[in-house]
Amino acid sequence: MKRAILTLFFGFALISQVAAQDMAPKVKILAMPEEPTRKTVLIGRAMTDDMIIMFEIEPAKSMWVPLDKSPDWTEHAPDPAEKFHIEVKPIDPRSKTRIPYAEVGFKAVNKDNSKTMEGLLHPMWGDSGLHYAMNSALAGDGPYEMHITVGVPIFARASKDKDIWRKPATASFHFKLSNDKLVEVSEPEVDL
């Protein structure tokens, strides 16, 4: 009986470990380091819960916001330490359009220094269309584990689509910084 319980326990532990490994993104080592402080770099695209979650890092940039319901826009410049612009694009795989009206959050862990960053990304419009983003200094060089969660969108759906995205969608990504250059990213799971 004791052996059967141990076998059952270790069997579940092994299944859990294999499932966790299957969920981890595949690492792609870049032939040449990419400079996200100079150009947009695709970190990965993951298919999850009927949604494609695309994650990129690019140079930090000013954002423009209206204040106090004024028609005038005010520039919000990046802090000097903020080198990177974290950008997430949730995409409907059928129509290839971006998913609006969702709360998009992230949690990033630098595996070398154990520093964790998390926050909500701002919905915005730019050269690449609708996306969710923020400027960040990240947490130094090293390999990162990034989890991005797209909350349930709060917009009306056609009756045939009303059950799409009824729960948050989460995708995991990997990237590695070395001297502020990307040397590893996630292998894209899907093409657009």
Image (cartoon, rainbow, N blue to C red):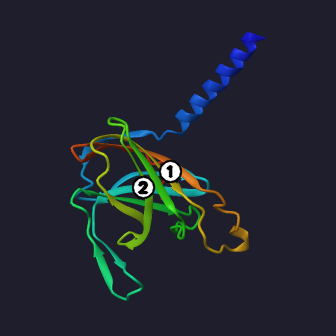
Q: Residue at x 23, y 47 (%)?
A: 180
User: Could you tell me residue 33's position as x and y percent?
Assistant: 25, 45
Mark 2 crowdedness (10 Å alpha carbons): few <14, some 14-19, many ≥20? many
**Residue at the disc numbered 1:** 46
Where disc 1 sits, the SS reads: strand
Quadrant in which the N terminus is drawn: top right
Q: Residues within 10 Å of mark 1 (few under 14, many from 20)?
A: many
Q: Is residue 44 visible?
A: yes
User: Mark 1: which amino acid?
Assistant: Ala
Q: Secondary structure at mark 2?
A: strand
Residue at the disc numbered 2: 55
Q: Quadrant of residue 13?
A: top right
- Residue under the image location 54 percent in, 66 percent down: 102
The extreme front residue here reads: 68
Whether the residues at callouts 1 and 2 have beta carbons within 8 Å, the answer is yes
User: What residue lies at 65% left-to-right and 75% top-to-bottom?
Assistant: 156
**Observer-nearest of 137 and 55:** 137
Instruction: Report, in whole angstroms, how far the alpha carbon at label 1 lies from the one at label 2.
Output: 9 Å
Q: Is residue 3 left or right of residue 69?
A: right
Determine the image quadrant of residue 136. bottom left
Relative image position of residue 38 (x, y in whole percent):
22, 58
Q: Amino acid at mark 2?
A: Phe
Say whether disc 1 or disc 2 marks the residue closer to the N-terminus.
1
Question: Percent from the top left, x then y, of residue 26?
Answer: 45, 39
